[in-house]
Amino acid sequence: MLNTIVSVIYVIICIFLSAVVLLQEGKSQGLGSIGGMADTYWGRNKGRSMEGTLEKLTAFAAGAFIILAFILNLNIFN
């Protein structure tokens, strides 16, 4: 029973991780990085923006993904 619950949580985290990664923007700065335009207000305050939040959620979901994969591989619930 507990194995099924952990497996369902694992699938939900997999879907969540995929969605969060797809919501993120690319890292390419284009021609703005040549002229020094890359250091803008949004670049300096990235941690408080939506992009910063998505990066934190990605790190959390990736950590949970790895931990649950390890736990499911141990077969301690069978």
Image (cartoon, rainbow, N blue to C red):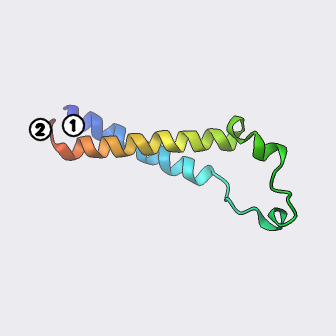
In this view of the protein, which residue sits in the foreground, 35 or 52?
A: 35
Q: Is residue 21 left or right of residue 6?
A: right
- Nearest to the observer: residue 21 or residue 3: 21
Q: Quadrant of residue 8?
A: top left
Residue 42 location, quadrant = top right
Quick one: label 2, few (<14), some, or many (20+) residues within 10 Å? few
- The part of the image, by quadrant, that contains residue 11 is top left
Whole-percent x and y of residue 17? 48, 47
Residue type marked 2: Asn
Residue under the image location 83 percent in, 48 percent down: 40
Pointer 1 residue? 3
Residue type at mark 1: give it.
Asn
Measuring from the top left, give residue 59's x and y in whole percent: 50, 43
Question: Residue at position x 65%, y 41% from top?
Answer: 52
Query: Mark 1: which secondary structure?
Result: helix
Q: Is the Cβ of the residue at disc 1 closer than 8 Å to that at disc 2?
A: yes
